[in-house]
Amino acid sequence: MARIVLISDDDGLRQDMRSLVTRRGHSMLEQPARAVCHANCLREPLDAAFVDLSAVGDYGLAVIVRARLHMPGTRIAVIDGGRGCDSLDRLARAVSLGADDFMKKPVLVSDAADVLERLGL
């Protein structure tokens, strides 16, 4: 069983991901707020982190850096709902910092399942 965290303020996304992850036999820690995530996130070993850049923006990039420093084996997927150059720049920065995969909003359950597969989960 993998331990996965989702950092997002999007209730619908959290519900869909929780359902998908638990159906696959994994556990999911949800971190809806930046302050809560800062206090709790990445304290225990994780197999994967899904970071919603639409919700947490540059803070999400800091989460990627922190995960790479303290838990280099953690698989990271970012989620972005933006459009245009800002969104592409944010995704490029996330990948350069160590994100393994990404999804664009709106996230379909089938897309999330594909990312889980690519992450080996």
Image (cartoon, rainbow, N blue to C red):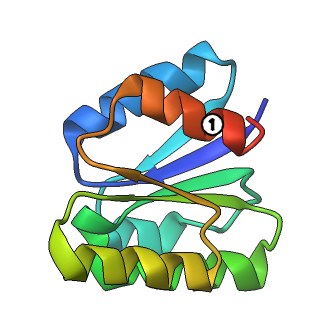
Could you tell me which residue is drawn at 41 percent across and 73 percent down? 91
Q: Is residue 67 left or right of residue 37?
A: right
Q: At which x and y percent is residue 80?
A: 31, 60
Could you tell me which residue is drawn at 80 percent across and 73 percent down? 72
Q: At which x and y percent is residue 108?
A: 34, 29
Which residue lies under the disc numbered 1? 116
Q: At which x and y percent is residue 69?
A: 74, 85
Classify the position of the N terminus by image quarter: top right
Binning the other alpha carbons within 10 Å of mark 1 as few (below 14), some (14 to 19) or many (20 upward) gives some
Classify the position of the C terminus by image quarter: top right
* Residue sitting at the far top: 23
Could you tell me which residue is drawn at 24 percent across and 64 percent down? 55
Q: In the figure, residue 90 lies in which quadrant?
A: bottom left
Which residue type does callout 1 highlight?
Leu
- Does residue 18 show up? no
Question: Label 1's element?
Answer: helix
* Residue sitting at the far front: 84
Q: In the figure, residue 114 lies in which quadrant?
A: top right
Q: Is residue 61 left or right of residue 10?
A: right
Q: Is residue 46 above or below residue 66?
A: above
Q: At which x and y percent is residue 53?
A: 33, 67
* Residue sitting at the far left: 83
Q: Is residue 58 above or below residue 110?
A: below
Q: What count of labels does the image hold?
A: 1
Q: In the figure, residue 23 lies in which quadrant?
A: top right
Q: Is residue 16 left or right of residue 61?
A: left
